[in-house]
Image: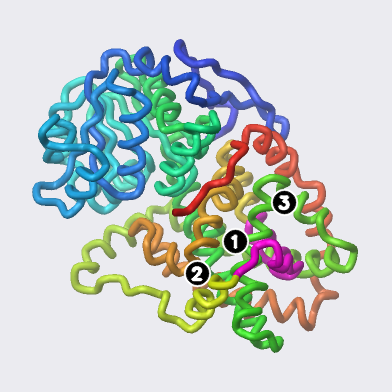
C-alpha cells in the first residue's frame, strides 16, 4: 500500500486536504451541523442494523439513532435470548417498536448491516451472515479482522454488496461519552478512519462518511481495510495496550528496586504515563513533552529513550510480522475455541494493582510527577511503533491516530480513571489476548536490556536516536492533527 493511492470523492460532505510530512491526505471534518446531510449520505438506506451490543456496538447504535433522528431506522440485532437484551432495552431499543430483534432477522431486514460482534464470532458465523444479507446491501465493519480471516481461508466477501469500514480510534465508552459531550461542544468526538473494500452501488464512500459523521467523529481520514487491521492489531499489542501494560509493570518494579514506596512507585510509573505524559502529548505532542523538561530532565529522558527505542522497534516489527503473516489472527481463533474450557482470568489481583487502587483514592492530578525516565521509556516505545508504521507504508493520519492520538485521547485517560488492569480485563477479547501475549515481552526486554543500559551502560547507547527524535516528522504531523482536536477531554463515568 502506498499513500498516493488513497483518494476519494464525496458528493455529500466537504472534503479538504491536509499536508502531513510532505504527503497530501483527504479528510472530512465532522460536527453536529452536518447531521442534516445524513439522509443524503444514506440515500437508499431505510434501515441500519447494528449487530451486537459490545462497547462499540452499544455506542454506535445509540449515536447513529440520535444523529439520524428517525430519518433512517436503527435496529439492534442480538442472539435469541442474549443477556445483552436488557441493556439494549434500557438504552431505548425495544421489540415493541421494531428497533430490537434477533440478529439474523435484523440482518435480513436491513439495507445496511454494521457487524460489530466479536472477531471470533464474525469468523465463526460469517457464512450464515453473508447468506442472510440482502442483495445490494451494505456490510459495515469497524475492524478489518474479518478480511484477514477470509484471506487465510482463501475466501472473500460476497459479490454484489458494498463492503465499507468506519473504525473509531478509541474505545466504545469514549465514542459514546464524547458524542454526548458534543451536545454542548460541537465537534466533540473520537476520530475515525474509513475504508471502502467493495463499491457496487457507487455510494459506498458517502455511506461510510455518513456513518462516521453520525458517530460524531471530529474528522475522518481514509485507509484501506487491510491497512487498518494491520495497524490496529499491531497497535493494540504494542503501545495502545500490550506495550503500555508491559512498560508500566516494568517501571513499577524498577521504582520499587530504587527504594520508592508502593504508592510512589505507582505514581512514577502508571500514574505518570496515563496522567501528565498523556495529557501533555495529547495537546502538545511528543516534542511538547520533551520541551517541558529542564536540561537535566532532558538528559535523563534522552538516555531512557535511547535505551527503550530499540526494544520497542524490535518488538513492534515482530508483532507486525505476526499480524501480517496471519499468525495473530490464527491465535485469536484458536484461543476462542479454548476459552470455554480455559476462560481468561483477571490480572487485577496482583499487588501492583492493589497499590494502584490505594493510590487513586487520594490522588491529586496536579501533583503527579513528570518522571523523565518514565517519559523517555514510554516515548521510546511509542516512537518505535510510529517508525514501524512509516516503514510499512501506512498513511500519516493512521500512524498518528493508531500510535499517539488513540492512546492519549481515549485509552490512557480511561486507564487513568480505572487502572491499566481494568482495561486489560474488560476490553475486547482480541485485545485482551494480545495484551496477555505481548505485555510480558515488553516487560522482559525492557527489564533485561533497556534498564541495565540506563543504569550501567549509558555511554554505549546510540546518541543519534535522540537527535532523530528531535527532528522527527511526526512532530509536525501531530501539530496539524492537534488543530483538529476537540476542545474537550473525555470524561469517565
Which marked residue is nearer to the observer: mark 2 or mark 1? Answer: 1
Q: Residue 383 sits in which quadrant?
A: bottom right
Which of disc 1 and disc 3 is earlier in sequence? 1
Residue 93 relative to residue 25: left or right: left
> Tell me, what colour scheme is on the image?
rainbow
Q: Secondary structure at mark 2?
A: helix
- Which image quadrant is residue 157 in? top left
* Magenta span: chief secondary structure: helix
Q: Does 376 lie within the magenta span?
A: yes
Whether residues under marks 2 and 1 lie with C-beta atoms below 8 angstroms apart, the answer is no
Q: Quadrant of the C terminus?
A: bottom left
> Where residue 55 sits: x, y (%)?
34, 49
Q: Which residue occupies 53% across, 59% down?
A: 238
Mark 2 surroundings: few (<14), some (14-19) or many (≥20) residues within 10 A: many
Tell me the number on the disc at residue 243: none
Q: Which mark is residue 286?
A: 3
Seen at 49% across and 67% down, the residue is 419
The range drawn in magenta is 363-383
Name the residue beneath numbered marker 1. 274
Q: Position of residue 455 (x, y in %)?
A: 77, 81
Q: From this viewpoint, which residue is outermost toward the right?
A: 295
Is residue 223 shown to the viewer in this render?
A: no
Seen in the picture, residue 451 relative to 211 is either above or below; the reply is below
- Between 61 and 6, which is closer to the camera in this rendering? 61
Q: Residues within 10 Å of mark 1 (few under 14, many from 20)?
A: many
Q: Is 302 on the left-hand or right-hand side of 319?
A: right
**Label annotation for residue 439:** 2
Report how far apart the C-alphas of labels 2 and 1 lie in the structure.
Answer: 16 Å
User: Helix, strand, or loop for circle 3?
Assistant: helix
Q: Earlier in the sequence, mark 2 or mark 3?
A: 3
Amino acid at each position: 500500500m502506498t499513500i498516493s493511492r488513497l483518494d476519494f470523492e464525496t458528493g455529500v460532505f466537504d472534503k479538504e486536504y491536509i499536508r502531513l510530512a510532505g504527503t497530501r491526505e483527504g479528510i472530512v471534518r465532522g460536527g453536529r451541523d452536518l447531521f442534516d446531510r445524513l439522509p443524503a449520505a444514506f440515500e437508499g438506506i431505510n434501515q441500519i442494523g447494528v449487530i451486537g451490543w459490545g462497547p462499540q456496538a452499544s455506542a454506535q447504535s445509540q449515536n447513529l439513532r440520535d444523529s439520524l433522528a428517525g430519518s433512517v431506522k436503527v435496529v439492534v440485532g442480538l442472539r435469541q435470548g442474549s443477556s445483552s437484551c436488557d441493556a439494549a432495552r434500557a438504552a431505548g431499543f425495544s421489540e415493541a417498536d421494531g428497533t430490537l430483534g434477533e440478529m439474523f432477522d435484523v440482518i435480513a431486514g436491513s439495507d445496511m448491516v454494521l457487524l460489530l460482534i466479536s472477531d471470533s464470532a464474525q469468523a465463526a458465523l460469517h457464512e450464515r451472515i453473508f447468506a442472510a444479507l440482502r442483495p445490494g446491501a451494505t456490510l459495515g465493519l469497524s475492524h478489518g479482522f474479518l478480511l484477514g480471516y477470509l484471506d487465510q481461508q482463501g475466501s472473500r466477501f460476497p459479490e454484489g454488496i458494498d463492503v465499507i469500514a468506519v473504525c473509531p480510534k478509541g474505545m466504545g465508552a469514549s465514542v459514546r461519552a464524547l458524542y454526548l459531550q458534543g451536545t454542548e461542544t460541537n465537534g466533540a468526538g473520537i476520530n475515525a478512519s474509513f475504508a471502502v473494500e467493495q463499491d457496487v452501488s457507487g455510494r459506498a464512500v458517502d455511506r461510510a462518511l455518513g456513518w462516521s459523521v453520525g458517530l460524531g467523529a471530529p474528522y475522518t481520514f481514509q485507509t484501506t481495510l487491510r491497512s487498518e487491521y494491520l495497524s490496529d492489531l499491531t497497535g493494540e499489542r504494542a503501545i495502545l495496550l500490550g506495550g503500555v501494560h508491559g512498560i508500566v509493570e516494568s517501571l513499577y518494579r524498577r521504582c520499587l528496586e530504587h527504594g520508592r514506596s508502593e504508592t510512589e512507585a505507582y505514581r512514577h510509573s502508571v500514574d505518570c504515563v496515563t496522567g501528565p505524559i498523556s495529557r501533555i502529548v495529547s495537546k502538545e505532542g511528543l516534542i511538547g513533552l520533551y520541551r517541558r523538561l529542564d536540561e537535566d530532565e532532558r538528559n535523563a529522558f534522552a538516555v531512557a529513550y535511547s535505551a527503550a527505542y530499540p526494544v520497542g522497534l524490535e518488538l513492534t516489527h515482530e508483532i507486525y510480522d505476526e499480524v501480517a503473516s496471519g499468525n495473530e489472527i490464527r491465535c485469536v481463533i484458536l484461543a476462542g475455541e479454548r476459552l470455554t474450557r480455559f476462560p481468561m482470568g483477571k490480572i487485577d489481583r496482583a499487588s501492583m494493582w492493589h497499590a494502584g487502587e490505594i493510590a487513586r483514592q487520594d490522588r491529586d492530578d496536579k501533583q503527579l510527577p513528570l518522571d523523565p525516565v518514565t517519559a523517555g521509556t514510554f516515548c521510546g516505545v511509542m516512537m518505535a511503533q510510529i517508525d514501524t508504521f512509516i516503514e510499512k507504508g501506512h498513511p500519516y493520519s493512521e500512524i498518528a491516530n493508531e500510535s499517539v492520538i488513540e492512546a492519549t485521547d481515549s485509552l490512557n485517560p480511561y486507564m487513568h480513571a480505572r487502572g491499566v488492569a481494568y482495561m486489560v480485563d474488560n476490553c475486547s477479547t482480541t485485545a485482551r489476548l494480545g495484551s496477555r501475549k505481548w505485555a510480558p515481552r515488553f516487560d522482559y526486554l525492557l527489564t533485561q536490556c533497556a534498564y541495565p543500559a540506563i543504569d550501567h551502560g549509558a555511554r554505549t547507547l546510540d546518541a543519534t536516536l535522540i537527535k532523530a527524535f528531535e527532528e522527527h516528522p511526526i512532530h509536525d504531523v501531530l501539530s496539524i492533527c492537534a488543530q483538529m482536536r476537540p476542545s474537550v477531554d473525555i470524561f469517565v463515568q
